[in-house]
Image (cartoon, grey):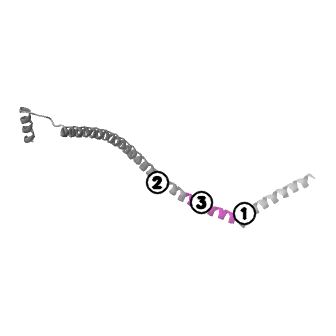
Amino acid sequence: MKDWKNIALFVTVVLCLFLGWSVFFKGDSAYKERIKQLEKENQELVEKRKELDALIAQRNLAIDSLTRVETELALQLAALETETRLLREEAERSRENWEDVKKRIDENRKKISELKKNPANRKGDALINSLKVKTEK
């Protein structure tokens, strides 16, 4: 009985080796096709990845360029804001000066109209000196 077990075991091992060898080396053509298809897909994905890497590098350069432009524009904006503030301050001072000049002009006009209505009465030497000053101008 022991011989039968050994023989059955030997036959089973030989059969398994034969079937494994035939499946491994002979193989099914569907597996080979699937392997070729996967290799082709892998190659396409590698090429697409290279294209995308190049596109990412290009976009990163564009982002860097735009960041530099943004920084320059921010600096220009800050300078323009400072200049605007200074110009507004100058405009406010000019408006105050204009109001002061306008006030003095109004006062002078009032004095002129009062002098026209009531001229100074000069007699003698004061009148002669006044006429000399007026004729020298």
Which residue occupies 18% across, 37% down?
A: 118
Position of residue 124 in the picture relative to residue 71 (left or right): left
Position of residue 134 in the picture relative to residue 73 (left or right): left
Where, quadrant-wise, is the C terminus in this rendering? top left
Q: In whole angstroms, how far apart are the C-alphas of marks 2 and 3?
A: 25 Å
Q: Is residue 33 magenta?
A: yes
Q: Mark 1 points at which residue?
A: 25
First of labels 1, 3 by sequence position = 1
Residue 57: horizontal and vertical position, in percent?
49, 54
First of labels 2, 3 by sequence position = 3
Part of the protein shown in magenta: 32-50
Position of residue 64 in the picture relative to residue 43 (left or right): left
Amino acid bearing label 3: Leu
Q: Residue furthest right?
A: 1
Between residues 22 and 101, which one lies in front from this camera angle?
101
Vertical order, 29 against 96 (above or below): below
Which residue occupies 42% across, 49% down?
A: 68
Q: Does the magenta stretch include residue 5?
A: no
Q: Mark 3 points at which residue?
A: 45
Q: Is mark 1 on a helix, strand or loop?
A: helix
Q: In whole angstroms, how far apart are the C-alphas of marks 1 and 3?
A: 29 Å
Tag count: 3
Residue 133: horizontal and vertical position, in percent?
9, 38
Which mark is drawn over residue 8?
none
Q: Is mark 3 on a helix, strand or loop?
A: helix
Which residue occupies 89% across, 53% down?
A: 5
